[in-house]
Amino acid sequence: MFYLAIKEILTIPTYNDPGTCRAGRVVIDHERCNGCGDCALICPGACLYVAGVGKDRKAYMIDKAVPDCMSCNDCAAICKRGAIRAEHGYDFGGFYKALHRAEMVPPRNF
């Protein structure tokens, strides 16, 4: 067993504090979205849902203090209409900061 120093405890990010971490965010174009629900089914963070009836059925991102979006872009890859895209990636901050080596691009469709 090991013990952490006070400095180490203070530098470990708290995942429910927006000051130390930033979750991913997706942008949904509601004009293109047909409400099929494929994005909500494939989302590993379960941060998307579909609401509405008939032509008003659209996909939405769960709006809570800390969404669980990992910016995996699975939703963008499965959307046949191109209605969803990742706006920015997640960042845990501090020691766990994600390396930003390139801009986020849409996933390849094979």
Image: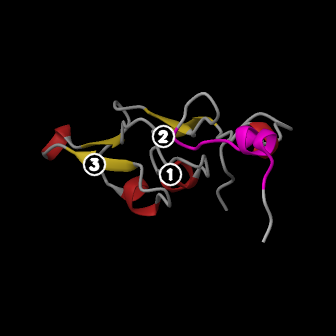
Whether the magenta-drawn stretch holds residue 63 is answered as no
Amino acid type at circle 1 is: Cys
The local secondary structure at tag 3 comes to strand
Crowd band around label 3 with a 10 angstrom C-alpha radius: few (<14), some (14–19), many (20+): some
Q: Is residue 108 above or below residue 87?
A: below
The local secondary structure at tag 2 comes to strand
Tags 1 and 2 touching, CB below 8 Å? yes
Q: Position of residue 39 (x, y in %)?
A: 42, 54
**Mark number, residue 75:** 1
Q: Position of residue 6 (x, y in %)?
A: 76, 42
Quarter of the N terminus within the rendering: bottom right
Tags 2 and 3 touching, CB below 8 Å? no
Magenta-drawn segment: 4-16
The local secondary structure at tag 1 comes to helix
In primary-sequence order, the first of circles 1 and 2 is 1
Task: Name the one closer to the observer, 10 or 19.
Answer: 10
Q: Which residue is mark 2?
A: 84
The residue lying furthest to the left in this view is 53
Q: CA distance from mark 1 to mark 3?
A: 13 Å
Q: Position of residue 87 (x, y in %)?
A: 58, 32
Q: Viewed as shown, does residue 102 lie left or right of 53?
A: right
The residue lying furthest to the right in this view is 101
In primary-sequence order, the first of circles 2 and 3 is 3
Q: Which residue is mark 3?
A: 50
Q: Residue at x 45, y 39 (%)?
A: 83
The mark closer to the camera, 2 or 3, is 3
Task: Name the one closer to the observer, 13 or 3.
Answer: 3
Q: Viewed as shown, does residue 48 lie left or right of 1?
A: left
Q: Position of residue 24 (x, y in %)?
A: 57, 40
Amino acid type at circle 2 is: Ile
Crowd band around label 2 with a 10 angstrom C-alpha radius: few (<14), some (14–19), many (20+): many
